[in-house]
Amino acid sequence: MFPAHSFKNRKVALFGLARSGLACAEALRLGGAEVFAWDDSEAAVAAANEASLSVSDLHDIDFATLDSLVLSPGVPLTHPEPHWTVVKAKAAGIEIIGDTEVFQREAAGTGARIVAITGTNGKSTTTALIGHIFQALGRDVDVGGNIGTAVFLMRPPVRDRIYVLELSSFQIDLMPGLKPDVGILTNLTPDHLDRHGAMENYAAIKARMFAQQTENDTAMIGVDDEWCADIAMDIKNGPKVRVVSVVHEMEDGISAVGGILREWQNGSEVARIDLRPMAALKGAHNWQNACMAYGAARAFGLSVAEIRSAMASFPGLAHRMQEIGLLGYVPFINDSKATNADAAAKALASFENIFWIAGGIAKAGGITSLTPFFPRIEKAYLIGEAADEFSQTLAGKAPFEVCGTLDKAVIAAARDAVNSGLADAVVLLSPACASFDHYRNFEIRGDAFVKHVSELPGIVMTIKGGS
């Protein structure tokens, strides 16, 4: 926790008392602001009182007496309709910002540097990988934002400290002062349109990542979708633009076609890293993440050899294509985060000869969209409520066994994978389902998978905490 001095002697309304809101409210108070904090949730207000934070019902406050409204990013700013605090703030003509904007103002002028990552998919892994590279190479780095740590629970800004921040579209929408040293846009597909109204609005908000950058800054943009390609083309002045593709090589930029990361300048290859042996960076989606992390590290002056070494030691994010153990030559992959078919498709596309554990509470459409990947499946092990539905989809297309529970599926999949004799066999938990029939969330499901795998005779765990 550190004070937000840039709001000293100002009157600030703050709505939203989850963890990041509580941290920001306390930072504002410590910095000398008069804070009026509130939440529509009685439980959140009670929690704030227990934390000795002064709360004030914003219904009763005259917003014309305030300087700013700090709004939780989870609260509607425009769609489907503005929150009542937004209506009051706009009527009073005061600024509406988020905790990340308060942080940006605190960091300005301190010599601290910011790497900001956004996009529809891949931003969490990219954020974690960049943080890992800097940390592995001895740089002074904090990782936070939309991933894990609220910005005011990080260490205070000082010269040469690097902040690696994952930013959602909701956070960027509340961050008019955003000016990262390196700004990264991974990709764009339709998402959160209930909050942004249209894809055009969603893309425009993401593009603000680069709006205030100068020639001393770097913009990294994945150009394998049309929305991002258009954003990259529209940047005429300002930052150095580095485009990224895992589909095409290019004259200038960074590519990873087939898992070989290449940096290109004026049509010539100037550096390469083979990503294929890196267990935590399997699949084209992770190759894109690696390209983004490579470009950020190069922008900070790190060498190709340093980056290669640090990438090779990246353990991956928990529950996201995470190798957790080896039984002989057979790896066990925890992809519990794959709560729908689209997410599971990325995992299925990354391996051959898959012993696939799937099931839970199915989303609309089930796994029919995964049919092109069925030839990769040596056998499926079905669990949870979706087992009957999935068995009907798989019938005649891939072998399957209805196991019912995760512990039984682990034992069966381990047995068959080891006995298969296939050199590239893999046991993959990528459920393509929500977890709520057996587990409160995907993290608990993933932890249960780790536990069951760790109990297999002869297993060698490759993550901390395994036996």
Image: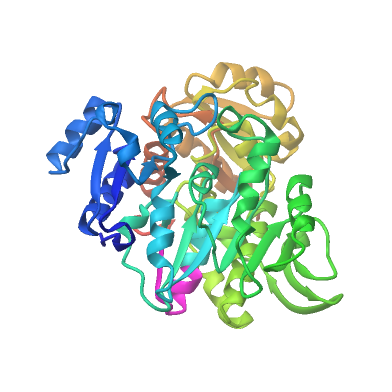
Q: Which residue is at a point 66% across and 44% down the rendered structure image?
A: 204
Where residue 11 appears, as percent x and y from the top left, is 28, 47
Q: Is residue 198 left or right of residue 452?
A: right
The residue segment tinted magenta is 132-143
Percent x, y of residue 455:
36, 46
Q: Is residue 311 left or right of residue 225?
A: left
The quadrant in which residue 301 appears is bottom right
Residue 311 image offset from top left, x and y in percent? 55, 69
Q: Is residue 441 above or below residue 11?
A: above
- In the rendered image, residue 81 lying in the magenta stretch gets the answer no
Q: Position of residue 137 (x, y in %)?
A: 47, 79
Q: Pick the quarter of the image with the C terminus.
A: bottom left
**Which residue lies at the image location 50% right of the left edge and 71% below the top edge?**
133
Image quarter for residue 428?
A: top right
Comparing 397 with 170, the one in front is 170
Within the magenta stretch, is there residue 140? yes
Is residue 56 visible from the viewing direction of this image?
yes
Q: Nearer the viewer, residue 188 or 274?
A: 188
Q: Is residue 285 above or below residue 430?
A: below
- Does the rendering let one see residue 246? no
Q: Considering the image in quadrants, where does the N terminus appear?
A: bottom left
Taking depth in this image into account, of 155 and 363 the one nearest to the observer is: 155
